[in-house]
Image: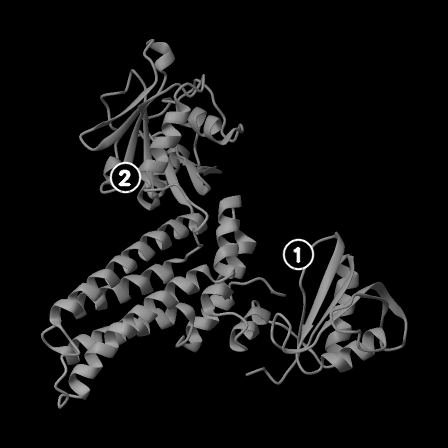
């Protein structure tokens, strides 16, 4: 159902630019259009017009576009005023819209109205924000696929599979007088096994999509002067960290983001871990330990002089995925290589010369579980993965309760309910508020 008020906002980023857009949506759009540009423009036709204030003075000149309901982004009447991108002139045009009956939109309110008016489901609405925030080209392409309904269609397929099995269970105890074996335990088991396989594949795809969206945080740790700063510089392709022969040069966290296989990888260079009386360096070591504790993956760097040593505080990384980098191979004349030792990835390289860096990049993607991303990958959020895991658990419970059709059917109903939360069919208002509050204003 459409809201009964009209909203307006500047839909382009803050700051100065060649073009700026003010977007208006709601029942007062025709009156606002008449008040600003003199009349309602022809539907979906750009019209050059003067944008005027209450006294008839020209505020700006640009293009006015009108999208009548329901064929618009929000499903309501929408007006877009495309003028010059100065913050002052855009504010004047927005103020005029408010004078004519609009109110300033909340973050994400245009997309929220699109969701409420069935123009998008919740997964598609989230993909709008993910497309805007995409950090790599692969993430952007995957967000477009989610926006086009790739994730929603996967969920719809799972819903149809759940419905097919539920029909058998419901019939088995709703019509007990029929002498027809509508529910064969073996047949139901096969269907549930097939369904579980589809759920597993969808969860795996969603996890890859979550990596695309959120990326991977990788902390570089090690003793002072082993080459962590040189390593982040060569990985990022920029001089983001100061490199000197003096141990303890890095005192604070230094960050850089790169893309590996389309995945954003957030690198964090940390202070060298050692016991010190220097209060500034001690704070750096504490921050390094915190960064390691929060990282998804740790690259522990050593050199020929420290290869047998692990720095104090290494317990902060217990339970984390670790790649052990043996740096400065140019000093000992050994070739670059990578191998797994006792389940831990080891890479021998030279950050100074760049030898072996490609081996490290492969090790990072492998340790993170990154798969080759095909054209069918969709963007996903942690909320989606939780919903899929919940639904999968209920399907497993149904499989274990085949001897009690009523209980099995209830588990399948709960699985469908979890999937419905993913697409927003039964989303609570507080969930919607949380999701759309993170959008930018004007979207």
The residue sitting at 52% across, 70% down in the picture is: 120
Residue 134 screen position, x and y as percent: 52, 50
Residue furthest toward the top? 333
User: Looking at the image, which is closer to me, 25 or 117?
Assistant: 117
Residue 109 screen position, x and y as percent: 57, 71
What's the mark number on residue 321? 2
The number of numbered badges drawn on the structure is: 2
Quarter location, residue 420: bottom left
Distance CA(mark 2)–CA(mark 1): 39 Å
The residue sitting at 79% across, 62% down in the picture is: 89
Colour theme? one colour
Residue 250 screen position, x and y as percent: 44, 30
Quarter location, residue 63: bottom right
User: Looking at the image, which is closer to me, 381 or 280?
Assistant: 381
Which residue does the numbered mark 1 point to in the structure image? 13
- Can you say whether 293 is above or below 303 in the image? below
The residue sitting at 82% across, 78% down in the picture is: 35
* Tag 2–tag 1 contact (CB < 8 Å): no
Q: In which quarter of the image is the C terminus?
A: bottom right
């Amino acid at each position: 159902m459409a809201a009964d008020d009209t909203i307006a906002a500047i839909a382009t980023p803050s700051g100065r630019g060649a073009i700026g857009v003010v977007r208006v949506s709601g029942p007062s759009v025709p009156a606002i259009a008449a008040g600003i540009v003199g009349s309602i423009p022809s539907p979906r036709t750009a019209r050059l017009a003067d944008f005027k204030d209450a006294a008839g003075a020209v505020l700006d000149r640009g293009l006015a576009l009108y999208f009548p309901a329901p064929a618009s982004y929000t499903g309501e009447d929408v007006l877009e005023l495309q003028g010059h991108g100065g913050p002052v002139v855009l504010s004047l045009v927005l103020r005029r819209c408010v004078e004519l009956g609009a109110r300033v939109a909340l973050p994400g309110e245009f997309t929220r109205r699109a969701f409420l008016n069935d123009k998008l489901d919740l997964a598609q609405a989230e993909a709008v924000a993910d497309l805007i925030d995409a950090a790599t080209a692969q993430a952007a392409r995957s967000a477009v696929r989610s926006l086009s309904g790739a994730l929603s269609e996967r969920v719809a397929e799972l819903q149809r599979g759940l419905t097919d099995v539920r029909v058998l269970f419901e019939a088995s105890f709703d019509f007990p007088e029929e002498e027809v074996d509508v529910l064969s335990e073996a047949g139901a088991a096969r269907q549930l096994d097939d369904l579980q396989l589809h759920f597993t594949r969808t969860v795996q795809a969603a996890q890859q999509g979550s990596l695309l969206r959120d990326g991977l945080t990788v902390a570089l740790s090690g003793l002072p002067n082993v080459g962590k700063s040189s390593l982040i510089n060569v990985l990022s392709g920029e001089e983001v960290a100061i490199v000197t022969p003096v141990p303890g040069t890095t005192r604070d966290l230094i960050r850089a983001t790169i893309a590996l296989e389309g995945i954003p990888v957030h690198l964090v260079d940390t202070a060298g871990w050692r016991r010190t009386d220097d209060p500034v360096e001690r704070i750096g070591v504490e921050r390094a330990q915190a960064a390691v504790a929060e990282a998804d993956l740790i690259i522990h760097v050593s050199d020929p002089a420290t290869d047998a040593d692990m720095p104090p505080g290494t317990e902060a990384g217990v339970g984390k995925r670790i790649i052990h980098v043996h740096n400065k191979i140019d000093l000992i004349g050994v070739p670059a290589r990578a191998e797994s030792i006792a389940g831990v990835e080891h890479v021998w390289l030279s950050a100074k010369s760049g030898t072996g860096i490609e081996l490290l990049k492969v090790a990072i993607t492998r340790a993170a579980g990154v798969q080759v991303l095909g054209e069918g990958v969709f963007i996903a959020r942690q909320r989606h993965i939780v919903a899929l895991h919940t639904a999968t658990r209920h399907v497993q419970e149904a499989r274990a309760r085949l001897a009690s059709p009523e209980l099995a059917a209830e588990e399948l109903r709960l699985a469908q309910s979890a999937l419905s939360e993913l697409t927003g069919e039964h989303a609570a208002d507080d969930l919607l508020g949380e999701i759309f509050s993170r959008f930018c204003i004007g979207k």
